[in-house]
Image (cartoon, rainbow, N blue to C red):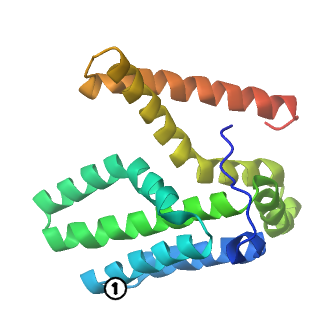
Amino acid sequence: MIPLHRPGSSLLHRAPAGVKLSILAVAALVLSLYPHDPLSIGIALLAVCALYAVGRMGSRVLGAELWRLRWIVLVLATALAVFVSPVAAWISTGRVVVLLLLASLLTLTTPMSALLDVLRRLLHPLRRIGVDVEAVAMTISLTLTMIPVVAGFAERVREAGRARGVRLGPRAVVPMLVLALRHADDVGDALAARGIG
């Protein structure tokens, strides 16, 4: 798995993993359920940028995270602008970007082992009804890390095409799919070696 955590001593690095996970969950609920206007989405985006500064990530890290989301933003915003309206495109795309940036910030400032511990504790009561808590916790943590991992694959494919002087376009999906499937096999082998799944 690609290591995402960046060690540091900022306020966000020192905050308990449970608190950060709770804030992400509340933010997801508020962004999903509360009706927003373009101004509130703009404020939310500025607030997330401020959180990156609080976590001492710097504009370079924030820029890299935004760059990784460029295709999601482009496809979603274009589709909504064409089929709904530019305002709906801004609001919906802004919601997605805020949540994905928050999820990335969580993984950047929190070791995966700490996240897994919190998820295990939260899910522990479900053991009584036969839920495999270890597998569910691992699935959630893997889900949190998949966006930057797949974005990394896209970057590798693009750089390989550029090095060969080839513009892949839609054909880039094939090597990306191969890399994603290989990564899934590696993760599956690693989980099996730990007795999970």
Q: Percent position (x, y) of residue 121?
A: 85, 67
- In this rendering, would 143 be left or right of 191? left
Give the image quarter of residue 173. Answer: top left
Q: Percent position (x, y) of residue 40?
A: 34, 85
- In this rendering, would 92 be left or right of 18? left
- In this rendering, would 51 be left or right of 174? right
Farthest top residue in view: 164
Image quadrant in which the N terminus is located? top right
Q: Percent position (x, y) of residue 49?
A: 46, 73
Disc 1 is placed on an element classified as helix
Give the image quarter of residue 13. Answer: bottom right
Image quadrant in which the C terminus is located? top right
Q: Amino acid at mark 1?
A: Ser
Task: Judge the density around disc 1: few (<14), some (14-19), many (≥20) Cα neighbours within 10 Å.
Answer: some
The residue depicted at 78 percent of the width and 74 percent of the height is 16
The residue depicted at 74 percent of the width and 58 percent of the height is 7
Relative height, residue 154 to residue 26 (above, below): above
Residue 25 visible within the image: no
Most foreground residue, 32 or 106: 106
The residue depicted at 65 percent of the width and 39 percent of the height is 2
